[in-house]
Amino acid sequence: MGASEPTWISWEEASRLTGIPVPTIEYATRVGRIARRPAQGTLPSLDRESVLAWAQWQRELVAQRKARQQEREDATAAKQRLEATSSPKDLLLGPPDEGSWMSLPAAAKRLDVGVATIRRWLDDERLDGVQRSERWVTEASVERLDVERRTDAAAWVSLKEARKIVTCSDLLIARLAEEGLIVQRPGPRGQPSISRESAEAAAPVLAQRREQIHAERKERESLRGRNRPPDNGTVWLSVKTTALLLGLSESGTTLRIRSGTLPATRRGRRWWVRREDAEQAAAAKAFERRRGDR
């Protein structure tokens, strides 16, 4: 990226840069496909590199969908031609003679998925197969995909599994991903996309944060208890209330307390004045004022 190219761009700039509509970019940002910094007024907030990476992935995904659609259309056309030129006996052909083959139900049972998923993986070329009177899949490709899925399952987990590992909400998972504590990969919906290792590493960090918040809350509660006036049946006034009674500022009242001219008791970080002492001080001040007026 050149020195003149911005690091952060707006939704409109991302749309012009990629040729993808703004609503699609907004959705990709909302689901975490595009990195975004916290909002800062009207400043651009989308990471340019992540926009370009996502746009490339989006274009490849669209191209793959078009290719699969074309393959399905070609397969349908070939099947129609076969049905038009073959006898009923020919249509009962089994798998090819060479290699080891599995039926779609057998492959589905082996991979613990539905037959529709096997068909989709054949269309996506994740499995190797052949179209005869029915579709057949190679045993070798089933074995290969089984190993890939087991490896992938060990490295990546779904949002639901990540929530259990970290013991938090979906929203907090998204915030941890924004912080970089949790690694999330782009991919099709429904595919596990959160790194198991990062989720396991984030769990103790989040637990430590919770402990710190709990400790700070307990400390605040303890301070509130220490700051309360003595519970001895006496009516106590705060510095603010005493200042109003004496017609002074809070700092002036505190100065009198510290100088010893106004009796007070310190509890934690706060001073407390007995009501009778405050009333006597107010009466004395009023008396001095009246005598000065004479």
Image: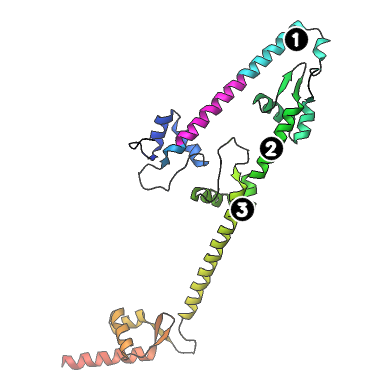
Name, please, the residue furthest toward the left: 294
- Circles 3, 1 touching at the beta carbon (< 8 Å): no
- Range of the magenta residues? 51-69
Q: Whole-percent x and y of residue 13?
A: 38, 34
Q: Which amino acid does label 2 sit on?
A: Arg
Q: Identify residue for label 2.
A: 149
Q: Identify residue for label 3.
A: 200
Q: Which of marks 3 and 1 is nearer the N terminus?
A: 1
Kindly state the secondary structure of the residue where label 3 is placed. helix
Name, please, the residue furthest toward the right: 89
- Circles 3, 2 touching at the beta carbon (< 8 Å): no
Kindly state the secondary structure of the residue where label 2 is placed. helix
Name, please, the residue furthest toward the top: 85
Q: How far apart are marks 2 and 1 (CA)?
A: 36 Å
Q: What residue type is labelled 1?
A: Glu
Which disc is residue 146 wearing?
none
The residue lying toward the viewer, choosing from 104 and 237, is 104
Q: Distance between the residues labelled 3 and 1?
A: 55 Å
Q: Earlier in the sequence, mark 2 or mark 1?
A: 1
Q: How far apart are marks 3 and 2 (CA)?
A: 20 Å
